[in-house]
Amino acid sequence: MITVSELNEKIKAILEATFMHIMVEGEVASATYHSSGHLYFSIKDDKSTIKCVMWKSNVKKLKFKIESGEHIVIDGSIGVYSPRGEYQLIAVNIEPYGKGALALAYEQLKAKLEAKGYFKDEHKKPIPKFPKRVAIVTALQGAALQDMLKVARKRWQLVDIFVIDVLVQGDSAKDEISKAIEYADTLDVDVIVVSRGGGSAEDLWAFNEEIVAEAIFKANTPIVSAIGHEVDFLISDFVADLRAPTPSAAIEMILPDFNEYLQLLSEIEDRVKFNISYKLRDKEQKLNELTKQLKLLSPIDRLKMYEREFANTKERLNEAVEYKFKNLYNQLEPLKARVQEAINMQLKEKNSKLKLLSEHLKLSKEQRAVKKGFVEVTKNGKRVDICQVKKDDLIALVSNDCKVEARVL
């Protein structure tokens, strides 16, 4: 004869020795995440149910949340609680049946954040057109950072870049990234870029963590998510204010192109100069017409009056132009020195070309001039030798004063 305790101990020894490592498939019937960090749940099939437990140390490693109705596969062992004579399945690892844990975790978190409104356009903050300060949250030694800095130097050197070094993969990466985003949000920057180069789903997983999504959503500074390659879509991409297909593309998207604006300024200068010249020519033409009328009528006083009016108009126009230029240069103060240098070089080049064209035109006119008493013979609008014309040809005799058409007899 044996006691109840002895019987339970024997059953415990037999079960735990027999089922030290088993894999069990079933549907989650209920699940409770205890305040202690342990997970208590049960699984079932169409005929029976078994209680399960996963201790806190293993729960931390789960990538997805256990919910009722999910079909899962448990890797674990059988454990017996002797005081009550109850046995349960002790889970060491859990995988979704028929799909990867990462894929299920991604779908669960995406659905959760979408339901909370984290992806809505109304929460997206606009990216400044001319950012002066940009913070980059990435690995300091990563190739992605060097590519981004290279693009920034090429496009817009008037920006200050702050690099916040973090781990971009591994178990502790999500905590470092979220804290770095919170820190960058205090630096008074215009844009925060969260980035890393390409990699496997496991390598990029830190950017699919809820803690990172929360940090992005709560930030007051506009955030650009630039993770992996163009085909990679992370949770951070959906929460961020702007998604870039690659880290380098992120810099191209947020920084203006210096050369484009330099060309734009040159075009503005040309238009302003043209408008000034046009207005001055128009005023001078009107003055000349009025002067001719005054000479015919001989009203000396009126002539002087119009001259004074022209002088005043010209002075006001010059003042207005000077005022507009002053405002323009004040607004573009950071670019003034470089733009002025480029303008001077272009003006010098254009003056050289104009001088060369003038010389060519003068030489062409001298070569084409027809001496008095002589004519130029043309056929079909082209100069020909008189000895080359044939009977019945239509030709033209052209001098400096007139043109005569003739038929050869």
Image (cartoon, rainbow, N blue to C red):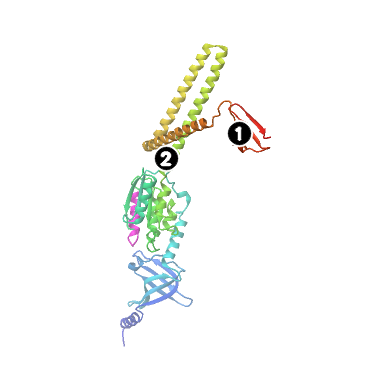
Residue 121 % position (x, y): 48, 50
Residue 227 % position (x, y): 40, 56
Image-quadrant location for residue 204 = bottom left
Determine the residue positioned at 37% across, 38% down.
338
Image-quadrant location for residue 189 = top left
Q: Which one is in front, 187 or 25? A: 187
Q: Which one is in front, 398 or 267? A: 398
Element assignment for label 1: strand
The label on residue 377 is: 1
Which stretch did the figure color magenta? 168-184
The label on residue 262 is: 2
Mark 2: amino acid: Leu
Task: Give the mark nearest the N terminus, 2 or 1.
Answer: 2
Q: Nearer the viewer, mark 2 or mark 1?
A: 1
The residues tagged by marks 2 and 1 sit, at their Cα atoms, a distance apart of 51 Å
Quick check: can you spot residue 32?
yes
Residue 252 in magenta stretch: no
Determine the residue positioned at 34% across, 47% down.
161
The label on residue 108 is: none
Quick check: can you spot residue 381?
no
Task: Judge the density around disc 2: few (<14), some (14-19), many (≥20) Cα neighbours within 10 Å.
Answer: some
Q: Main secondary structure of the magenta part?
A: helix
Viewed as shown, does residue 406 lie left or right of 66? Answer: right
Mark 1: amino acid: Val
Residue 50 % position (x, y): 41, 75
Q: Which one is in front, 37 or 360? A: 360
Viewed as shown, does residue 85 lie left or right of 317? Answer: left
Q: With respect to residue 171, does 4 lie above or below?
A: below
